[in-house]
Amino acid sequence: MNLLTTIAISIVILLHGLFMVLEMFMWNTAYGRKVFGLKEDFARQSATLAANQGLYNGFLAAGLLWGLVSTGGNDALVFFLGCIIIAGIYGAVTANRSILFLQALPAAIAMALLLLSNEGLTS
């Protein structure tokens, strides 16, 4: 895997780590409400759901990290990047169009770079 591919995947890992922190720990703070455009009452009522969503983002980041550091981790990278792309498209359609650009696009770029690299889908 080349350096550009590794950087792109690392950016996706960092993004999903940040999403996890925002959703699990900052959802109901002034900063979290500002980032997500939430009213205080709604943020309080939906905090448990947001924390669950954040946990999933953490699992996605962990899966990508695992794929990056393990020998033959390309299959894991393709799987987790694919999950992120699908979730990003679904989120853009059902929740907020910006999810397409914040979540799906970086993962799609990383996926394209991964598939174009010499190793591609082989382990």
Image (cartoon, helix red, strand yellow):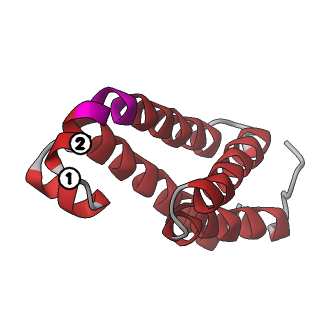
Residue type highlighted by circle 2: Ala
| Residue 97 against residue 28 in the figure, above or below | below
* Residue 42 % position (x, y): 25, 42
Count of numbered circles on the image: 2
Residue drawn at the location 83% of the way across and 63% of the way down: 115
Q: Looking at this view, name the residue that lies furthest to the right.
A: 122
- Element assignment for label 2: helix
Question: Residue shown at 34%/31% (left/top)?
Answer: 51
Q: Which residue is drawn at 69% across and 45% down?
A: 83
Q: Nearer the viewer, residue 121 or 50?
A: 50
Instruction: Residue at 60%, 62% (x, y): give it.
Output: 92
Q: Are marks 2 and 1 in contact (CB under 8 Å)?
A: yes
State the separation of the CA atoms marked 2 and 1.
Answer: 6 Å
Where's the N terminus, which quadrant? Answer: bottom right
Q: Which of 73 and 26 is in front in this view?
A: 26
Hey, which residue is sitting farthest left in the picture? 30
Q: Left or right: where does residue 116 sit relative to residue 18?
A: right
Return the residue at label 2: 43
**Residue 49 falls inside the magenta stretch:** yes
Position of 2 compared to 48: left or right?
A: right
In-front residue for pair 26/93: 93
How many neighbours does mark 1 have within 10 angstroms: few (below 14), some (14-19), or many (20 or more)? few
Amino acid at pointer 1: Lys
Q: Residue 39 — which label?
A: 1
Give, as a single range, the part of the protein colored magenta: 45-51
Q: Is the magenta stretch mostly helix, strand or loop?
A: helix
- Horizontal and vertical percent position of residue 29: 12, 46
